[in-house]
Image (tube, helix red, strand yellow):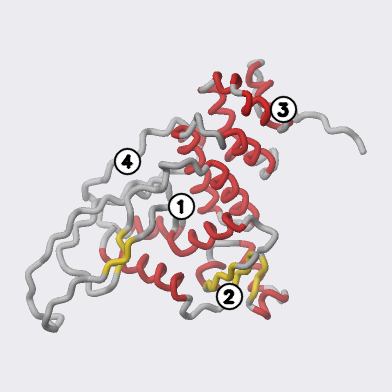
């Protein structure tokens, strides 16, 4: 990521931390998030409508999200400002300044910093796409740090290229944030990603929805033996409609690639308690299209 983009992301992160110029408050339980309408409304259809139309929220500048999952709300807000969530903490570093002030025209010896690999393969967002397009072409691409994901074939959307390695030849006069190259994938966050996917769908945030799906798919591969996998499968089916195949196709593909999952007692219990999943696994085992007829519902 080149210097202008680093400066932009640092500015957004700073706005989120200090809440300066905030003109909208999001409530969720005991937490209050001071956010900015221009940023939030440009990414979410729901918040745009709430602030544009003559609703109470547009007059008071307060939107209550108490009914939503607190963790999912927190990750959604973080995404607005960082274009990501559940990453390793950003380490704030102050730029080292010369002991004497120099004018913009004064020469100074360049200080070469270690090249930082920034993998944006898991990010799909209009702003991030614009930032990636601004990067000079022809630079060396950073190879993805993660293994090739066999779920990628399920995603109809294109994948953003990795950004070139950023070599800082001069000192940054601004206080910036050091972006971590890898997301927090050491521990399973399957249920969390499913909840973030659901809240992104609810509030019309396509970039976050796509990101949550890719994180979910990647973690399904990494943490196939995780104890929270059964709950994640249930979450994927209980928080989405039948026509939303984003997480459901990932779950079905996981069972198709790992048939031994059906031997786990916790997985069997989750399948029994999730009719939609049980029906689709039945069709898969029978060699039928998974997205065929839906299970019949009893009349009231």
Q: Write down the residue under mark 1.
A: 86
Q: Secondary structure at mark 1?
A: loop
Q: Secondary structure at mark 4?
A: loop
Label at residue 24: 2
For the N terminus, the quadrant is bottom left
Please name the residue that numbered disc 4 is placed on: 145
Image side of residue 21 versus residue 112, left or right = right
C-alpha span from label 1 to label 3 = 31 Å
User: In front here: 154 or 252?
Assistant: 252
Is the residue marked by circle 2 packed among few (<14), some (14-19), or many (20+) residues within 10 Å?
many
Residue at mark 1 to residue at mark 4: CA–CA distance: 17 Å
Picture quadrant of residue 92? bottom left
Q: Assess whether mark 3 and mark 1 are in contact (beta carbons under 8 angstroms).
A: no
Q: Nearer the viewer, mark 1 or mark 4?
A: 1
Query: Horizontal and vertical percent for residue 136?
Result: 25, 56
Q: Secondary structure at mark 2?
A: strand
Of the residues tagged 3 and 2, which is closer to the observer?
A: 3
Q: Position of residue 223 (x, y in %)?
A: 47, 34
- The residue under the point 27% across, 67% down is 93
Q: Earlier in the sequence, mark 3 or mark 4?
A: 4
Tell me which label, 2 or 4, sits earlier in the chain.
2
Q: Are marks 1 and 4 in contact (CB under 8 Å)?
A: no
Depicted 300 relative to depicted 160: above or below: above
Mark 2 or mark 3, which is nearer the start of the sequence? Answer: 2
Residue at 40% across / 55% down in the picture? Answer: 129
Could you tell me how far apart the alpha carbons at marks 2 and 1 are, in whole angstroms? Answer: 23 Å
Number of numbered tags placed on the structure image: 4
**Mark 1 or 3, nearer chain start:** 1
User: Badge 3, how many Cα within 10 Å: few under 14, some, many 20+?
Assistant: few
- Residue beneath disc 3: 272
Between marks 2 and 1 in the image, the one whose residue lies nearer the viewer: 1
Q: CA distance from mark 3 to mark 4?
A: 37 Å
């Amino acid at each position: 990521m080149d210097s202008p983009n680093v400066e932009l992301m640092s500015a957004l992160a700073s706005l989120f931390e200090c809440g300066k110029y905030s003109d909208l408050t999001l409530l969720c339980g005991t937490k209050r998030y001071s956010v900015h309408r221009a940023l939030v409304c440009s990414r979410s259809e729901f918040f745009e409508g709430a602030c544009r139309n003559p609703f109470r929220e547009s007059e008071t500048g307060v939107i209550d999200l108490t009914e939503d999952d607190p963790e999912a709300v927190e990750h959604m807000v973080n995404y607005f400002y960082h274009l990501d969530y559940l990453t390793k903490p950003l380490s704030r570093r102050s730029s080292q300044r010369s002991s004497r002030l120099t004018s913009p025209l004064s020469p100074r010896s360049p200080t070469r910093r270690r090249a930082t690999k920034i993998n944006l393969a898991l990010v799909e967002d209009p702003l991030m796409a614009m930032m990636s397009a601004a990067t000079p072409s022809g630079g060396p691409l950073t190879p993805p740090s993660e293994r090739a994901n066999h779920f990628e074939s399920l995603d109809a959307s294109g994948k953003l290229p990795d950004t070139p390695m950023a070599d800082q030849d001069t000192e940054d006069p601004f206080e910036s944030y050091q972006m971590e190259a890898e997301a927090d994938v050491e521990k399973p966050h399957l249920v969390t990603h499913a909840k973030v996917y659901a809240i992104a769908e609810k509030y019309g945030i396509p970039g976050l929805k796509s990101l949550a799906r890719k994180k979910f798919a990647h973690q399904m591969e990494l943490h196939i033996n995780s104890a929270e996998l059964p709950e994640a499968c249930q979450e994927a089916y209980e928080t989405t409609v039948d026509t939303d195949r984003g997480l459901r196709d990932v779950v079905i593909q996981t069972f198709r690639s790992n048939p031994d999952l059906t031997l786990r007692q916790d997985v069997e219990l989750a399948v029994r308690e999730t009719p939609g999943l049980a029906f689709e696994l039945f069709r898969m085992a029978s060699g039928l299209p998974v997205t065929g007829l839906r299970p019949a519902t009893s009349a009231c």
